[in-house]
Each structure stands twice: as structure tokens, then as C-alpha cells.
Image (cartoon, helix red, strand yellow):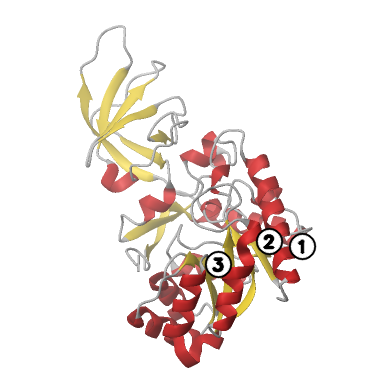
């Protein structure tokens, strides 16, 4: 269920805060995958969208979004190159690269259309996933230029901000990496126009002294991870899962009460960082925790205060990682003031290529 009023408030608040910093906002649509939400983000002033795959880009371009960044080090096959070229005829397309080999393949497979696709070199700012060291961006950019691609800048994802006490340090490292990488590219003769960063935990800490744009995604909905990291409050949670108590689990008299709800890993997703206190939270019972997940069962530990929900009771569950939950359903129920007002198709669901 998506609360339309909270969703719109989250969209407007992020747009206003980023605008006040003098940054461009390019929200990551892999979180919601819904054209109606993208339209609201664009109307609030987003400069474009970020996506993770060509498939997601195709969905949002078909919905009218004209500026899309695929923030991923693509390795193109001829078939993917054809899709990317078709996209570039209807929207401004930028993609990520983080190797000379990837950049070369990108340019070769795009052929005469290579100049229609912009390239940003991905920098590792501390997350240690994809991306090159800031001092190593020039060879990647030079390979891209030799392959006929237009290099416009650098980007990073400070994903290590998703841990207690880390957002401020991750934001500092993000700024340092973008600054160093930009200087290296400039010294190599490239005109850097875009320095792209920002995750939901760090976006409010990112400054325009280095970055030119930010790409938060989870902020539209919030989730249990953001709640536990104090990057949102309960009143900011726009998406919950409606679940029903289906069973009570017999427990020792001195142990916590446990019951089962009908929202397992195939609804909530299975993400649980080592620091997280559970697999999800109950919206109206903040002390309860989802202690275990199976495919179709979630075990809830009840803290002991108040009566345990009865079999048949309906509860609102906050997923740990909302991006996964959205990729597991075909559509969402949209509510306003407690009433069902619409249903939205998760149009980019499963567009993982």
C-alpha cells in the first residue's frame, strides 16, 4: 500500500531541499519502478531519472521521461546496443563505465551512434563495489573517447552510508572522491560538467562545492533500514505491506510471544544487514520485530506490552529494503486519507536487463 499524501510530501520535500543546496535532483527510479511516481518527481523539478538497467530506461522513456542516466557499468551485447540506440533517439541517455574494456566495447557496439550516448566514469568512494579509484579515471575516460563516446563527468555511489554512524563519513568520502576524480579528468583534457553522487542516507549531507547532482531513491517511500538509521521518521513511511496474522506460535511462558503473518521473503524481500534488528518492522507496533522469514511466513516477536494480535488481524509491515519489495509485486494499492484511490502498475518490475 502506498500512502499518496506521504509519498507526495516526501517527493516535494526532497526536491525543495536539493534545490536549496543548488544541486540537480536525479532520483533513482529502481526503487519505485512506477511511471506515475516518476511523473510526480519530474513535476516537482527533477532534472531527469536514474535507473539501473536498459529495461528500466525503456519503461520510463516510453512514459515520457526525456533525460535518463543508467548508473551502471554496462557491458553491451549487439542486442543491448540496438536497444540503447533506440533509446537515444527519444531521450538523452547517459551510461556508466568503470573499465577501459567496457568503454571500448560500448563504443564499438554502438558504432556510428556512439556520439549520441554520454558517459560518466564510475568512482569507488568507499563502498568497494564497482568503480575505479579516483586517481585511475583518466585511462577509462580516454578509452571511451577513443571509442567515440562523449565523456561528461564522474559518478559514485556511497553505499557504505547504509550502516549506523556512517552517513556523514560516507558523504565526506563521496565529496573527496568526486573532487579528486574531477581534477584528474580535467588535467587529462576532459571538460567535466557532471559530478553525480548521493544516496538517501547521504543526500542531505552532500554539498554543491563538488557535486552537481544527487541520485537518492528510497526517500520516496522510506523503509525499515532508513528508520533504524534515523534517516527518516515513522511518519515519513509511505509504503507498507498489508499482512494478516495466520498463526500463533507456542512459546515458553518467560519468552516473547510469537505469531506468524502471511508476508514472507517473496513479499518483503530477504535483506537484513548485520546491524538491523530484524527483517522488518510493524508500522503501528514499533517495538515488535520480524525475527525470521520463510518464503510465505514471517515470524513476529511481540515485545510483551498489550494483547498479542489475534489470528485474522491485519497489520501494516515496513519492509527492510523497499526496493526489493517493489520488484516482487505487479501493482500497488494507492490510498489517501485511509481510502483506496487508485492502483498503480509496477511497470519496470523484472526489467533487470
- For disc 2, the marked residue is 181
Residue drawn at x 61%, y 38% as measured from the top left: 166
Residue 348 drawn at (x, y percent): 38, 67
Q: Residues within 10 Å of mark 1 (few under 14, many from 20)?
A: some
Q: Quadrant of residue 263?
A: top left
- The residue identified by callout 3 is 40
Tell me which numbered mark, 1 or 3, is placed earlier along the sequence: 1
First in residue order: circle 1 vs circle 2: 1
The quadrant holding residue 242 is: top left
Q: Nearer the viewer, mark 3 or mark 2?
A: 2
Please give the residue where the numbered disc 1 appears in the rendered image. Answer: 22
- Mark 1 or 3: in front is 1
- Determine the residue located farthest toward the bottom in the rendered image: 112
Evaluate whether residue 149 shows in this view. no
Which of the two residues, 3 or 79, is positioned nearer the viewer here? 79
Q: CA distance from mark 1 to mark 2?
A: 21 Å
Q: Is residue 234 visible?
A: yes
Amino acid at each position: 500500500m502506498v500512502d499518496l499524501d506521504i509519498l507526495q510530501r516526501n517527493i516535494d520535500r526532497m526536491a525543495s531541499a536539493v534545490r536549496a543546496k543548488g544541486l540537480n535532483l536525479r532520483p533513482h527510479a529502481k526503487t519505485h519502478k512506477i511511471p506515475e511516481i516518476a511523473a510526480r518527481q519530474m513535476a516537482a523539478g527533477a532534472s531527469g531519472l536514474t535507473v539501473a538497467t536498459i529495461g528500466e530506461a525503456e519503461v520510463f522513456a516510453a512514459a515520457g521521461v526525456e533525460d535518463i542516466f543508467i548508473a551502471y557499468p554496462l557491458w553491451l551485447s549487439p542486442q543491448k546496443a540496438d536497444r540503447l540506440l533506440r533509446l537515444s533517439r527519444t531521450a538523452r541517455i547517459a551510461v556508466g563505465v568503470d573499465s577501459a574494456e567496457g568503454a571500448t566495447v560500448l563504443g564499438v557496439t554502438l558504432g556510428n551512434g556512439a556520439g549520441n550516448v554520454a558517459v560518466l566514469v564510475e568512482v569507488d568512494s568507499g563502498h568497494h563495489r564497482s568503480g575505479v579509484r579516483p586517481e585511475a579515471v583518466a585511462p577509462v575516460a580516454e578509452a571511451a573517447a577513443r571509442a567515440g563516446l562523449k565523456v561528461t563527468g564522474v559518478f559514485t555511489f556511497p553505499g557504505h552510508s547504509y550502516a549506523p554512524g556512517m552517513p556523514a563519513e560516507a558523504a565526506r568520502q563521496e565529496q573527496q572522491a568526486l573532487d579528486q576524480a574531477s581534477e584528474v579528468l580535467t588535467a587529462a583534457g576532459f571538460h567535466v560538467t557532471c559530478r553525480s553522487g548521493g544516496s538517501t542516507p547521504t543526500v542531505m549531507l552532500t554539498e554543491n562545492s563538488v557535486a552537481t547532482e544527487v541520485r537518492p531513491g528510497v526517500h520516496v517511500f522510506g523503509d525499515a533500514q532508513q528508520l533504524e538509521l534515523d534517516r527518516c521518521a515513522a511518519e515519513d513511511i509511505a509504503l507498507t505491506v498489508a499482512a494478516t496474522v495466520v498463526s500463533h506460535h507456542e512459546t515458553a511462558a518467560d519468552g516473547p510471544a510469537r505469531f506468524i503473518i502471511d508476508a514472507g521473503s517473496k513479499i518483503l524481500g530477504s535483506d537484513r544487514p548485520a546491524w538491523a534488528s530484524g527483517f522488518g518492522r510493524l508500522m503501528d507496533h514499533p517495538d515488535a520485530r520480524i525475527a525470521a522469514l520463510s518464503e510465505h511466513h514471517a515470524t513476529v516477536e511481540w515485545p510483551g506490552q498489550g494483547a498479542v494480535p489475534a489470528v485474522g488481524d491485519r497489520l501494516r509491515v515496513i519492509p527492510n529494503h523497499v526496493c526489493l519489495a517493489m520488484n516482487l509485486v505487479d501493482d500497488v494499492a494507492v490510498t489517501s486519507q485511509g481510502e483506496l484511490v487508485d492502483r498503480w502498475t509496477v511497470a519496470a518490475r523484472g526489467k533487470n536487463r
